[in-house]
Image (cartoon, helix red, strand yellow):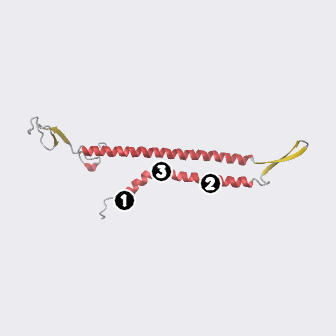
């Protein structure tokens, strides 16, 4: 048996349980980055291929201006490609907003938990200072047994006297009885 009183497996399990929501959020953020890179790369390839005349509808128009004739050729990618890119962009923005708000929510929860834990530590310290077991009243583990009870009385000389239950009680004059 080790001399080290710390149960590292239990501490690790408790830490992993506490960090599980944050780790899940980091995984979602990683997927968001992957989607952003895929969006940029695939749309870049898609639109660079569409500069080829094979994928464009070419419309030629002729205009006369000041006696000269000018011919303009307008290339536009297929509307379906533009629609798919727009839908993907909107979905990507929604995903980014979702991940960002989830991180803010988790940060808020972590800050509140930290405040609550600090308040709980203060409660336990106050309970210890009052002579209790240091365990809050609403936690009653079976291994603790019955709570130690102590009564405080004011003696004749004005000092506080701690009295345990198994001792006989003193009367008003300070004598047993």
- Residue reaching furthest front? 66
Element at badge 2?
A: helix
- Residue reaching furthest top? 172
Give the mark nearest the N terminus, 1 or 3.
1
Residue 57, horizontal then vertical, whole percent:
80, 49
Residue 95, horizontal then vertical, whole percent:
58, 46
Q: CA distance from mark 1 to mark 3?
A: 21 Å
Q: CA distance from mark 3 to mark 2?
A: 23 Å
Q: Residues within 10 Å of mark 3 (few under 14, many from 20)?
A: some
Give the mark nearest the N terminus, 3 or 2.
3
Residue at the location (29% across, 48% down)? 141
Element at badge 1?
A: helix
**In this orientation, which residue lies closer to the viewer: 63 or 145?**
63
Task: From the viewer's perspective, tell me whether residue 2 is left or right of residue 104.
Answer: left
Residue at the location (39% across, 44% down)? 115
Which residue bears the numbered disc 1? Answer: 8
Residue contact at pointers 1 and 2, CB within 8 angstroms: no
Image: 83 above or below 1: above
**In this orientation, which residue lies closer to the viewer: 145 or 148?**
148
Element at badge 3?
A: helix
Image: 170 above or below 92: above
Image quadrant for the N terminus?
Answer: bottom left
Image quadrant for the C terminus?
Answer: top left
Which residue bears the numbered disc 2? Answer: 37
């Amino acid at each position: 048996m080790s001399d080290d009183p710390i149960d590292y497996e239990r501490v690790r399990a408790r830490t992993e349980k506490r960090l599980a929501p944050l780790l899940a959020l980091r995984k979602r953020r990683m997927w968001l980055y992957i989607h952003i890179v895929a969006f940029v790369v695939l749309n870049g390839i898609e639109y660079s291929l569409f500069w080829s005349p094979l994928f464009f509808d070419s419309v030629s128009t002729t205009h006369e201006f000041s006696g000269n004739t000018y011919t303009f050729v307008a290339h536009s990618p297929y509307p379906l490609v533009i629609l798919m890119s727009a839908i993907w962009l909107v979905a990507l923005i929604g995903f980014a907003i979702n991940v960002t708000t989830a991180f803010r929510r988790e940060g808020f929860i972590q800050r509140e938990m930290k405040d609550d834990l600090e308040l709980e530590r203060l409660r336990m310290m106050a309970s210890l200072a009052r002579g209790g077991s240091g365990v809050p009243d609403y936690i009653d583990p079976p291994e603790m047994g019955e709570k130690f009870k102590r009564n405080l009385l004011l003696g004749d000389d004005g000092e506080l006297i701690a009295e345990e239950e198994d001792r006989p009680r003193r009367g008003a004059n300070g004598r047993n009885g």
